[in-house]
Image (spheres, rainbow, N blue to C red):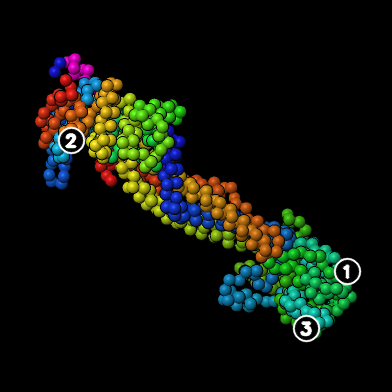
Amino acid sequence: MTETSAASSIIRCVDLWRTYQMGEETIHALRGVSFEIQPNEYLAIMGPSGSGKSTLMNLIGCLDTPSKGEYYLRNQLVSKMSDDALAEVRNKDIGFVFQTFNLLPRATALENVELPLVYAGIPKAKRMERAREALDRVELGTRMSHKPNELSGGQRQRVAIARALVMGPAILLADEPTGNLDSTTGEEIMRLFARLHEAGNTIILVTHERDIAEHAHRVVLIRDGKIASDEMSRKAS
Amino acid sequence: MPFQEAIAIAVASVRANKLRSVLTILGVVIGIASVIAVVAITDGLDRYMADKVLALGTKSFTIQKFPDVIVSFDQFREFNKRKDLVLRDVDLVREACTLCSEVGGLLVTGRTVKYGSLRQEGAQIMGITENFARIGAIRDLLTGRHLINDDIDSARPVAVIGTDIVEALFPTAEPLGKEVIIDGNRLRVVGVAERKGKVFGQSQDNFIWTPITAFRKSFGSRRSVTIQAEARSMAVFEQAQDQARLALRNRRHLEYSQPDDFNIETGESVMDLWNSATQGIYVVTIVVTGISLLVGGVVVMNIMLVSVTERIKEIGVRKALGARRRDIQRQFIVESVLLTGIGGILGVLLATLFSFAVGKLMSGVVGDEFTAPVQLWAVAAAVVSSTVVGLVAGIYPASRAAALDPVVALRSE
């Protein structure tokens, strides 16, 4: 690992620990995880349930802070940040895609995509313009005024991806993005990720499915709170 | 997050739960409506009282054996031990009260008046002195003549009658010169007084004036006379009362330390009584409203806690997308204030309707114009207090929402 790679890396984790106190018992969900992610990498974090991959995802996504260790995102130390500063990082630097889409049911596709822009304090006209662009990028330009329950599962996930992309984040963090979709629709979403990756986005997939992980170019396997393996997949070649 | 976004979210949330929202704010609506309505109605009554009572004559006063208001039987027994006021006392006051322009005597009883086969029940038979119509509110005649000193001195059986009596006994005939019969006593009608309408639903025209001397002959002399007096001006109103008081006290040989054994009543004393009564109403209203707003606030807080619990997932999503603590907090406080604010507005509308209806109803009861317009200051106070209730009720649920851990919130279903 060279100095240049450390400075250019988009994510740098140094000896991340996360412990939970469950009554008397102390649970070590992460036990010293270190790795780096470069810009425009397409990476999968894999591991069985209980491996600590969700904990790692929460730390990468700045939803949680480590008990010990340092986490740099775009060279800023986020592991010591205040709540409000973390909220801003989540707003500007991270695009979340969830397994269950997590769209607001009463809002239209456009309004859902606008949401991060609302919290960024961007005025209404500008918001609508950028949200339309993002929806166009996931080929949903024609369904903008539909509510989530008027959209198919694949379309919902594409709305969620548009929402994740709309702020131009450093990374796209997808947690089991195909978990609630049938395999055809899942493939369609994975093709969308591949296209976004080609367009220059940095993508982190969190999954327990090997065939989904294989879409990524690098697979990090988590087991018992530690990195068990970190290797390039066949796709990377 | 800009403020209008928080409002938009709150509006959407309230609209999504219409029935619940309406039920939630019911307490606030009722609280606000009741305070505004009560203020409007008491204010209307105040003005009505001021109009009517003060129209009875601002510089006139009466001296009576009994006060206008007796609150218990014990009190009545106490007052009943007092000496009656007699016709001689009227003359005494007339002489002593140099600051009075008029001093007269009055006796009143209720009787049935007959003319031929027609009868009028419950007519007010008033034994008066010649100056009666000039004391307090001036009363003019429609036709005929007033009673004169000669009528009083020789106790002539004559009468001036009110328009209710005319309508009941002389629907077609000319009343002047006719004789009406009261308990077998014949009184010749010499005049008809102008119509005054109703005050508090009580007709002011169902009366018969007759000389106080004739009254005593016909209906008995063992009654306490009411002395009526008119001060020369507002400036000497108090002094005129003191002259009358002193004269009566001297005549009754009251010691310095003894209280008056008669009552002097003025329009003001009625107004004072009225004001102290309405003040009581105000205090009760404020307390009751306070309680209903408190309960309303608790209901709103409870529903806001439910709303937060229902939307934990949404809060998690919003936090993941970059909402800060204060964004979430603002969202729920705005929603709470919106709820109570709507409650306040509905309360104002309800109160407006209610006081309008009461105004109409009262107009019917009292027999003339009565309005109870909603007071602007009460509306302002209602809007402010409902907003404050919303703020206070919203703070705790909103803080709980804002403090949620995004990881936990996102995991919840």
Q: Residue furthest front?
A: A184
In the image, is A144 to the left or to the right of A3? Answer: right
- In the displayed structure, would residue B392 be above or below residue B210? above
Residue B27: x and y in percent read 46, 55
Taking the spot 27% from the left edge, 21% from the top edge, the residue there is: A198
Front one among B241 and A62: A62
Q: Which residue carries the number 2 mark?
A: A209
The disc numbered 3 marks a residue on which chain?
B
Residue range (magenta)? A3-11
Taking the spot 21% from the left edge, 21% from the top edge, the residue there is: A38
Residue B144: assigned label:
1
Would you identify the image quadrant in which residue B230 lies? Answer: bottom right
How many angstroms separate mark 2 from mark 1 (CA)? Answer: 113 Å
Q: Decide if residue B272 is in sight here.
A: no
Residue B204: x and y in percent read 74, 67
Q: Which residue carries the number 3 mark?
A: B183
SS at circle 1: strand
Q: Earlier in the sequence, mark 1 or mark 3?
A: 1
Would you identify the image quadrant in which residue A143 lies? Answer: top left
Front one among B135 and B4: B4
Would you identify the image quadrant in which residue B54 lies? Answer: bottom right
The disc numbered 1 marks a residue on which chain?
B
Q: Main secondary structure of the magenta part?
A: helix
